[in-house]
Image (cartoon, rainbow, N blue to C red):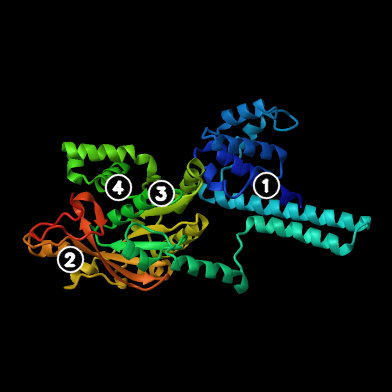
Amino acid sequence: MRSKQKKYIQSEQSVLNQLLGRDAVFDIVSDVIIAHDFKAVRHQVIYQAISDLAMSDKPYDVVMVADLLTERGQLNETCCPESYFAVLGMLPGIMFSSLRSHAQLIKGRSLRRQSIAQLRFGIQKLEDGDRQTIDINNEVMSAIGNLESSDIVSDQARVGEMMGSMIERIAAAKDGVTNFIHTGFPELDYLMMIEPGNLVIVAARPSMGKTAKVMNWLSYIAKYREGEAVFFSVEMVATQVMDRLASAEADINLTSIRKGDLSADEWGRLQRFISEQDNMRLTVVEKKELTISDIRTRLNKIKRETSGKISAIGIDYLQIMGGLDGQYKIDNIGVVTRTLKTLGQEFDCPIFLLSQLSREVEKRPNKRPIMSDLRDSGTLEQDADIILMIYRNDYYEQKDKGGSAKLDGMADIILIKNRNGPTGTIRLAFEGKYSRFVNEKPITNNLDVIPNYRGS
């Protein structure tokens, strides 16, 4: 028994050692454990100090934590000796990737201790014999049930309980109040009907505009939906993402932004975009070798530092995320997509995951993509709620005819899988020079060049 207790204390020490020795790791465990979950009192006060410093956006190294404990009168032999930090520092390290698992072990032990305490309380009350047995039993079972429900999201509901909310949704939809997420493209929105927690895969060959499509969605959601939208860029640096965003939002040619050659009108539109940036709750994360652990950590941190809610997540793109190379690539992709679905449900928001299509598309006379063109399509097809593909005939016309083709600037958004409703194809205009898709029809009949869809 004593060896087991020692093992659990070592787990607590290992977690604290990792937190004290690394920057920005608190958010990996912040949604799993609280100070009360630690068994040792000295561990409780150390973790509470780490938590308070992190919540104030301050570093939580040994010096900062010890200083805060001194202020609180807790750095002493009774509560937490100063020498104890040296003890923590000499412990063998645990793998960074297993930190969350150790935190979950601490949480599990905490729930067990609290359950034992409630049962002992019940035994004591039963032995006192001054209350009805059934009342004590109900009280104890209710207390234990509350412990479990505080750690587990409810995943069951009776049909009768769900009926009322269904009627309300139908009535609201009839009155024009939709319960799905709008992205700024009404015809496409009413086909996809994206819901919080959906994993939406946007697939295309290079240069089709998949990054532009997801950025268009995120910028709209960032302006009109509660919470912070987050775009994880594995391929492009943050400055490139910002250039594209400004181009799309301010109607400025992307090339002009990169050259710094803006007209007076373009400078005016850029100034308006800058002045309105507070209304765009969008965070760009530039991270090479991005892993699921990185995503969860950063989302928890952004959630804590901003509005307390994540509205949407974009990841560009799947095949170059970290840990997906080698012999077990397909299995690892399956782990990633299943975990992303869990993350979408955890943060109650859609996840837009970009994916490359196979080169086999280029070998066919008809280059319109189909489901089997998805690279590693088995796991993606199984886990995704929505899969859409982007096809621009203009791109291939120009390529095949050496730049002499007449262009209409249109793109087919092919909804090839949809758990929320029907599949189908929606045509949108693609304005490559502005790095965006738009709903409008062209304002000119001259198709020698790609027309301006928004105009003035």
**Mark 4, other Cα within 10 Å: few <14 / some 14–19 / many ≥20:** some
Q: Amino acid at mark 3?
A: Val
Q: Specify whether 206 is left or right of 302.
A: left
Residue behind mark 2: 393
Q: Amino acid at mark 2?
A: Asn
Q: Amino acid at mark 4?
A: Met
- How many angstroms separate mark 4 from mark 3 (CA)? 15 Å
Q: Quadrant of residue 264?
A: top left
Residue behind mark 4: 236
- How many angstroms separate mark 3 from mark 2 (CA)? 31 Å
For discs 2 and 1, the disc positioned in front in the rendered view? 2
Q: Are marks 4 and 3 in contact (CB under 8 Å)?
A: no
Q: Earlier in the sequence, mark 1 or mark 4?
A: 1
Q: Residue at x 55, y 67 (%)?
A: 165
- The image's mark for residue 37 is 1
Q: Quadrant of residue 414?
A: bottom left
- The image's mark for residue 230 is 3
Q: Secondary structure at mark 2?
A: helix
| Residue 342 percent location from the top left of the image | 50, 60
